Image: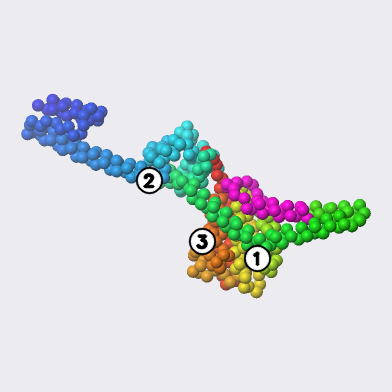
Amino acid sequence: MVGRPIKKLTVHFKNIISGNAPLSQRLEVERGDEIGELLQSFNQLANHLFEAQEAIKTYAQTLQTIFNHITDPLALVNLNCKVEVSNKAYQEWISQKKGPVFNTECDPLKADKNKTCPIALIRKVIETKHPVSEYISSPEGGYYYTHLYPVFDQTGKVIKVVHYVEDVTEKKRIEEQMAITEKLAAIGQLAAGIAHEINNPLGGIILCLDNVIRSSMDEKTKNQHIELINQGLSRIQNIIKVLLDFSRTTELNLRVCEVKDLIENVLKLINYYLKEKSIKLKIELEQNLSPVYLDSNKIEQVLLNLILNAVDAMENSEEKVLTIKVYHKDSKMFIEVSDTGSGIPPHVAEKVFDPFFTTKPLGKGTGLGLFISKSIVEQHGGKIWFTTSEKGTTFVVEIPLEGRRIHER
């Protein structure tokens, strides 16, 4: 009376656990006593669990559908670097070898945290308990912004990581085109000064050549004239080289650079322009400046944009002083460009980094200078901001000394 129905219940329960019987299968109840009530209660419990199981399946399918319809790659990764859940975009991203793949044989706690790879990024997330974002590129020309977000348990321990990848290839291409536009605008603004810098030595060269050809002179005088010609040609060559280096279109090319050299290159292009505008130049460089890891060509563009803006800001100032200051602080390099203009009004200040926003007359500005500068600085893992008052404005560029290293897969 008791043993057989209990055994039947136990066998059925084991079959459910092993998967040989569904939760929806009911036990036949033929008795109205306590044993029958037990079997009936079991049927009710099984039915409740079956309905809950179906609801979870439906919910999971709905989540997976939503997950798959997210067009950017998205995945959930455990601390052993194994991808547990991923959407179709992520699977395609991996299968097409567009980005770095997690190596499940690696230990994130032993990975080199200074390298930009998925394992090292997970280590950063574990150690800092904060999201980590890095730019990565692929040999196929793709450009991605990868984000890792920590998932915590109830004790605040990181147990998993959400890996989200943003394809910024097209955005980068557009920004490069906009940067070219801004470069051309800046060169156009400096065209008269560059022509003057080239014309002066060119006039001297012509004069010396004319003397050499038309007049009789001793060997010493002739050699002096030839030396002057060489000096003039070298000066023109240097100006053209700086101009071509500044104008060329390049991918982000990070290398160790001396900021002093960058400033000198920019001043070669703009010295005449500063003299023409009666600008007094002050350079304040901290002693023993460390080299910094950056793209010299792009940072030169940032400096030129900031200097040109500073010159324009002092158009109506009685005292026109441009100050360029460079110093170290907290493993970062700071470059300050200050003017003695009338400052930036509050209604303009909130828009200065917006694309195509400009206060300059039509034809004198593209409104891309500060927008492009901000983009370039952020690519280096840095920041740009400004302080302003009625006595002038200072733009500050902050760049980590190691820079934002961009590694290919």
Seen at 56% across and 56% down, the residue is 181
The spot of residue 337 in percent (x, y) is 62, 62
How far apart marks 3 and 2 lie (CA) works out to 31 Å
Q: Name the residue under label 1.
A: 322
Labels 3, 1: front one: 3
The image shows residue 366, relative to residue 256, as above or below, that is below
- Would you say residue 377 is visible in this rendering? no
Residue 235 colored in magenta in the image:
yes
Labels 3, 2: front one: 3
How far apart marks 3 and 1 lie (CA) works out to 25 Å
Dot 2 or dot 1, earlier in sequence: 2
Horizontal arrangement in the rendering, residue 240 relative to residue 7 (left or right): right
Specify the segment rendered in magenta: 232-260
Q: Name the residue under label 2.
A: 70
Q: Are marks 3 and 1 in contact (CB under 8 Å)?
A: no
Most extreme residue toward the front is 214
Secondary structure beneath dot 1 equals strand
